[in-house]
Structure formats: structure tokens, C-alpha cells
Amino acid sequence: MMYYQSQAQNWGFYAQPGRDGGEDPLQRVARLASESAVVIFSLTGCCMCHAVKRLFCGMGVNPTVYELDMDPRGKEIERALSRLLGSSVPVVFIGGKLIGAMDRVMASHINGTLVPLLKEAGALWL
């Protein structure tokens, strides 16, 4: 997989859009989510996406970020995630497991379960 760093902001790794061979959107999400310790499906202009990326980077985590509005099949993935969760981006996976949208990430952070998840996935060592 190829990665590039954003010129404007350093959120971690941004995955370049690639060819997925007509893969089902949810299968593609599952595959992408399993390839990195922390994966965020995002939109570049979304304020909640910005906040969740800031949270992880502030904790010293370098998430892999898939900006769906930069991906030719991003709308399909966004719709599939919306059907799965009942809400849109951001959608966060840790250790290949679906954590959820911003509300679930923040709840996990506040109740103290986020850091152990990140450690278990190998995204945080402290």
C-alpha cells in the first residue's frame, strides 16, 4: 500500500486512492481497516473528522486516513458505512475492529477504554 503525507496538515498516513477491482464497498472497508492499527474514514471538509484526527494525533497515534472525497469510489464506501452505522463519517477502526463514529470514540476516550484499545492494537506504546 502506498502512503503520502498531507502537505497542509500532518494527521498520520493518508492512503492514496487505488484500484480495488470492483470489490464490494463493505469488503473493501474490512480489508482497509485490517491493514493498519488505526484507520479513519473521513471527508476533507468535515469538522468532526478533523476533531477525531486531532484527538488521535494529540495522543501520539498516527492513523491511516482514507479521505473518501478524494477516492473515486469514496461515495460508495460512505453510503455503505452510513447504512452500517446509521451515521456518516468519521468512522474509526482500531485493530481492525469497528469502534464507530465520533460519539463512540469520544465516549471511549472519556471512560478510559480508548487507550487500552490503542495499546492492544499496537498504535500506542505508553
Image (cartoon, rainbow, N blue to C red):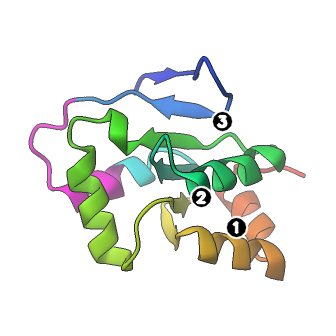
Q: Position of residue 5 (x, y in %)?
A: 58, 21
Magenta region: which residues? 19-31
Which residue corresponds to the image point at 32% horizontal and 30% vertical from the top-left? 17
Q: Earlier in the sequence, mark 3 or mark 1?
A: 3
Residues at circles 1 and 2 in contact by the CB criterion of under 8 Å: no
Q: Position of residue 41 (x, y in %)?
A: 45, 51
Q: Is 67 on the left or on the right of 56, as rendered?
A: left
Tag 3, which secondary structure?
Answer: loop
Q: Position of residue 125 (x, y in %)?
A: 83, 49
**Position of the N terminus by quadrant:** top left
Tag 2, which secondary structure?
Answer: helix
Q: Earlier in the sequence, mark 2 or mark 3?
A: 3
Label drawn at residue 117: 1
Q: Is 22 on the left or on the right of 110, as rendered?
A: left
- Badge 3: few (under 14), some or many (20 or more) residues near its Cα, within 10 Å? many
Q: Position of residue 15 (x, y in %)?
A: 44, 32
Please, is residue 116 above or below residue 2 in the view?
A: below
Q: Tell me the residue that label 3 is attached to.
A: 11
- Badge 1: few (under 14), some or many (20 or more) residues near its Cα, within 10 Å? some
What amino acid type is highlighted by mark number 2? Met
Which residue corresponds to the image point at 71% horizontal and 72% vertical from the top-left? 106
Instruction: Identify the image quadrant of residue 77.
Output: bottom left
Which residue in the rendered view is the most extreme toward the right?
126
Q: Earlier in the sequence, mark 1 or mark 2?
A: 2
- Badge 2: few (under 14), some or many (20 or more) residues near its Cα, within 10 Å? some
Q: Tell me the residue that label 2 is attached to.
A: 48
Query: Label 2 vs label 3: CA separation?
Result: 14 Å
Foreground of the two, 121 or 75 = 75
